[in-house]
Amino acid sequence: MSLDLTFQNGLAAIISAHGGISVQIGTVTGTGLLVLSDGQTDFSIEGQMGTTISTVRVSAATFTAPTRGDPMKVDGQQVYVLGVRTSGGIHVIATQDTQPVEGV
């Protein structure tokens, strides 16, 4: 068994034991693990505004790594990719719920 497959099986076991969230990247839908959700407040001329930054782990066997700025859905909510790191057959995807200013 390859190291990637070992990590992917481990992620699947954690999701099975503790629950996961639905993830859609492009047309592919699967289950991921939400490992961080950070609500942040910004102040603007209109008052307080907020954004949520999240980190999701998904199997590279199910999903192709998205590109920075790509839209995706996490638990039914559209978010945008801030960055992706792939290690051990797992994509670790940082997202936020507001469109990044710099775009793609």
Image (spheres, grey):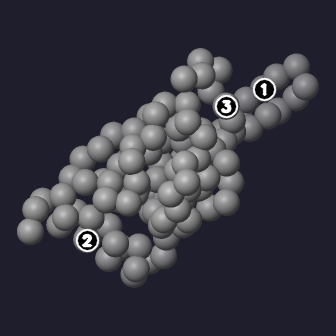
Residue visible at 79% across and 34% down? 49
Q: How crowded is mark 2: few (under 14 residues within 10 Å), some or many (20 or more)?
A: some
* Location of residue 60 with respect to 1 vertically, above or below: above
Q: In which quarter of the image is the C terminus?
A: top right
Q: In which quarter of the image is the N terminus?
A: bottom left
Q: Residue 43 location, x and y as percent?
A: 78, 26
Q: Residue 93 location, x and y as percent?
A: 44, 45
Which residue is label 1 attached to? 43
Residues at discs 3 and 1 in contact (Cβ within 8 Å): no
* Location of residue 2 with respect to 95 vertically, above or below: below
Say which element carries label 1.
strand
Q: Which residue lies furthest to the bottom in this view?
A: 17
Pick the front one: 78 or 35: 78
Q: Quadrant of the rendered structure where residue 27 is?
A: bottom right
Three-letter amino acid code at the position of disc 2: Asn
Which residue is label 2 attached to? 9
Residues at discs 2 and 3 in contact (Cβ within 8 Å): no
Q: Which of marks 3 and 1 is nearer the N terminus?
A: 1
Three-letter amino acid code at the position of disc 1: Phe
Pick the front one: 15 or 52: 15
* Location of residue 104 with respect to 25 vertically, above or below: above
Q: Residues within 10 Å of mark 1 (few under 14, many from 20)?
A: few
Calculate the distance from the C-alpha at mark 2 to the C-alpha at mark 3.
33 Å
Which residue is label 3 attached to? 99
